[in-house]
Image (cartoon, grey):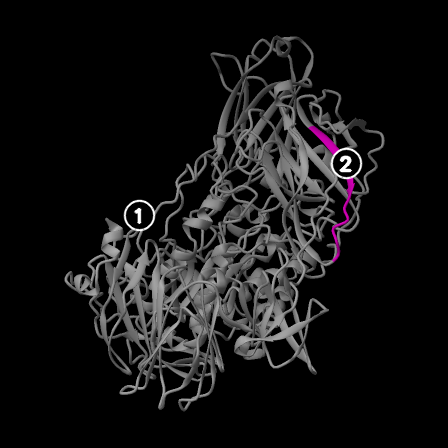
Amino acid sequence: MMRSFLLAGVAALIAAPAMAQEARPTVNLKAPVKTFGRVSFDGRSLMIDGKRTPIWAAEFHPYRLPSPDLWRDVLQKIKASGFNTVTFYFDWSYHSPKQGELDFTGIRDMERAITMAGEEGLYAITRVGPYVNAELARGGFPGWLNNQRARARTDDPEYLKAADEWLAAIDGIVARHQINNGGNVILHQIENELSQTSPAHRRYMDHLYAVTRSYGITVPIFHNDPGRNGNWVPDGSPVPGVVHGPVDMYAFDGYPGGTCTAQGKIARGNGAPDWGYYGIGGAKGGASASPDTPGFMAEIGGGWFDYWGSDGIYACNAVQTGPGYGRLFYGTNFVNGIGLQSVYMGYGGTSWGWLPAPVVFTSYDYGAAIAEDRSLREKALALKPIGGTLAALPEIAAMVPAEKLTPSSDAIRLYHNRSPETDARLILAAHQPGHLTQDTSFTFAADLPDGHYQMPQIRLNGYDAKWIVAGANVAGQRLVYTTSQIQTAQNGLLLMIGRAGEGGRTVLRYSAKPAVKAPDGVAVSWDASRGDLTLDYTHGALSTVEISGGGRPALTLLLGDDAAGGACWDADGVLACGPALLRHARAKGGVLALTGDTVAPAPLRVWAKQTRITWNGAPVAMRPAAGGSWQSIAPIPGPVPIALPALSDWRMAEGTPEAAPTFDDSAWQAIDHRADATLSQKPAGQPTMTMDPYGFHEGDVWYRAHFAGSPDAQRLSLTYGAGGAGMVQVFLDGRLIGQQDLPAAMPRPITTGNITVPMPDAARAPGDHVLSVMARNNGHNWDLTAMDEHKEGRGLIAASLEPLTGPAFAVPMNWRIQGRSGGEDFADRARGTPNNGGQYGERMGWHLPAFDDHAWRATGAALPQGSAGTNWYRTHVTLNVPRGQDATIGLAFGDTAKPRSAAHYRVLIFVNGWNMGQFIAHVGPQRIFPIPEGILNHHGANTIALAVTSDGAPANAPENVRLVTMQNRRGGLEVAQVAAPAGLAPIR
């Protein structure tokens, strides 16, 4: 039925008229320009040095990639994917192990990250908190802040004093890199998603704005409103119902594309919303809340995070928010006057160690354009034409609604915008709600700057959009209109793309008939009355059309489909097609030095003035090709396969001596009645048991209590906090008597639990007995509601040894606690706060490469089951990745085709001393853990240490562990090993 519809003529299509998109007066087109040095704005757009500039940004968190040399790799890929800006979140906790201490060295050198971004030609947006959320433990608050009774995110002086220490430091770094100081930072965010709007919160925001300015920030300041509530809008906004705040610009976020289903199925129920010109308007209409400032989405969904116990939906989410989604949703934003958009995430990375909040596991891949292993997904290639179109027509950022256009099909909606300055047009065609997956052909008529035109038949297949540019001066030409999308526009060179097999038309205006050299498949016609040169074609492999004369400079017009465009890259003003990535094109003398990546042998075609070309330093023999290009005579080489050794020669040691009744815990802290700030109320009169008041904020914590055997010792009741998929183990006199996992498989997991353990007869025998309890803290809650959610208790909250009929707390117990060695004064400052918890092996340095494990039991290639509790396994492996190749190597556990195992156990993964994540076999879904180069030594020796926790049952033994190549490219960058101590003196 669809096929016959598509073959119907244009006349039939015209017979079914549809409604056009209706614009509303949501923007003050007469808003005065507000200037902040080199950055300014009015109601329509941001301006840099007085020029209207679309801000097309991708979010990247350097703390989720603990190998700083690889930050440049990600930034180059963001730039190559068409973005002109990177957005940085900064995590206060990452830098502050204790109050009064802030560390910006090594993996925490955020000045280096901002500098790199500028060197790669990217503007930067900085988001410093104090609260950032970002699916981080405590939302980015440092662990020590959990002991502060002051209400966070308010004007409480104690909280403000702490926040000011952080802001003074991070703002000082940002200030040095502002565009007004010769750097690249153009916008700065205070706080994030603050949903509370009481007077105390207004005073808090006033304070943040004032101190931010006092610390030297001179660019516009904004806040990110979660979900278009009209909160924290500049004070001048006249829109009823908004909450005014001390910001220069209003920004909001949205994730309108939805996510895949729990079963990993694509969902296409959501159309792209109108959050600007064509929307509902008012305080909750998005950009309409602030008519005097340009539309600004501080976060627009580029994927979504995944949770413990899911089936693993990152790969699906990458498709859910794939190429068609990008053209549809981001395009709809632009035509709604939202000229500033930051895609969250551009690169998600890894929530290594104890970074993650309870709502996420180790991987923060996000389904982003750049995968966790740093490979470019298909959606990244599809983002290039968006950036290319914006670069060719920056006035898109400041266009306003134009004459309504009526499509021939009621399945289609058309947006028509124009530039008040140049009269250039952008027409966006999308499906109406209810037709999102339909395959539709349509046409429409439009009065364009160069005359009245009837469009050819245009096909829109499913979840997608067409960006139709008209009336624009591009690449030295007059573009009447095109139904293809601009990917690259340089003087004399224009690359346009479209869906494979679909027709395209490009119309150019000349004062006289030009000479055209076109290949077969490109139909050329000339309208002398108008001066229009019309090219009709089908998008496919790259075609070259050469046009000269006609009163304009010569033009090479390249036409191709998405795959052809995906293989073409624009770097440093040079277009090159063929490789998997072009990083830079640097001319020196008569040589053009290209750097980039290949995933297989690839052709190389370059448009450049230089005739001598090198690729990654090696000369490439070239010959002249069509359109003034140069074509490699032979393919440039691809990577060679990487031979990874099997993991063998394992050694094993039992790592739960704390359970033994003879273990000496005299150096542990005594549990007492000290003050705390937890929200998890303890029973009246009972001691303070949660871990934070004792200086332990990350990872595992141990408790031990001696008691005298008593007839009343019949059951043990524990209340505990453990985060997402956390756990507790209970030992009596060295024997495991109870274990509990918190429920998983929920996007918002249960983070506290109760366990009642029947006490064995031995507990009632006379004499001294020892209870040992290990609690795994899988992250403190975020503080999304600004109600101090992050202060929910972790570790034990209450413990009662009692008879079955009561009373509670009948058997006296004196508890001691031990977490990470040194607490807040831990020794390994290089790896920092996320790296370690309180396992015995961590306290003894068993995870570190210099530890001498020769006395451990050799187990060969096997990982045999050990006793109940935590057992440690170590091996050493030497890698020899070919030089000049960029690979991501991961650790894989068991059957990677399944999200979960039948065996119940969990593993802390240490590589060369770095905690690179947690595998929970029976919860899942993550089974492969990428280890970035710089943490993993690709050209030398490595130490892998696994801390495996289970009940000791044979059925719950650890599965096979192996190295896998996740991505392999020829090219890349030089990556140094991250400096960190190989060993530390164990702390008792």
Instruction: Look at 50% across and 62% down and name the residue there.
Output: 566
The secondary structure type at the circle numbered 1 is loop
Give, as a three-letter code, the residue at label 1: Gly
Residue 11, image quadrant? bottom left
Q: Answer with left or right where residue 913 lies relative to residue 44.
A: right
Which amino acid lies under the numbered mark 2 shown in the image of this protein?
Answer: Thr
For label 2, the SS is: strand
Q: Position of residue 702 (x, y in %)?
A: 65, 31
Residue 10 at x, y percent in the picture: 21, 65
Between residue 774 and residue 835, name the one nearer to us: 835
Q: Residues within 10 Å of mark 2 (few under 14, many from 20)?
A: many
Residue drawn at x 61%, y 31% is 894
Q: Residues within 10 Å of mark 1 (few under 14, many from 20)?
A: few
Q: Read off the residue under disc 1.
A: 269
Q: Which residues are magenta?
A: 871-883
Image vertical order of residue 3 relative to residue 77, above or below = above
Residue located at (78% from left, 51% from top)? 939
Q: Is 971 displayed left or right of 859 in the figure?
A: left
Main SS of the magenta part reads strand
How far is the residue under mark 2 from the one under mark 1?
A: 49 Å
Residue placed under numbered mark 2 in the picture: 875
Nearest the camera: 308 or 813? 308
Residue 145: where, in percent of width, then height? 56, 49
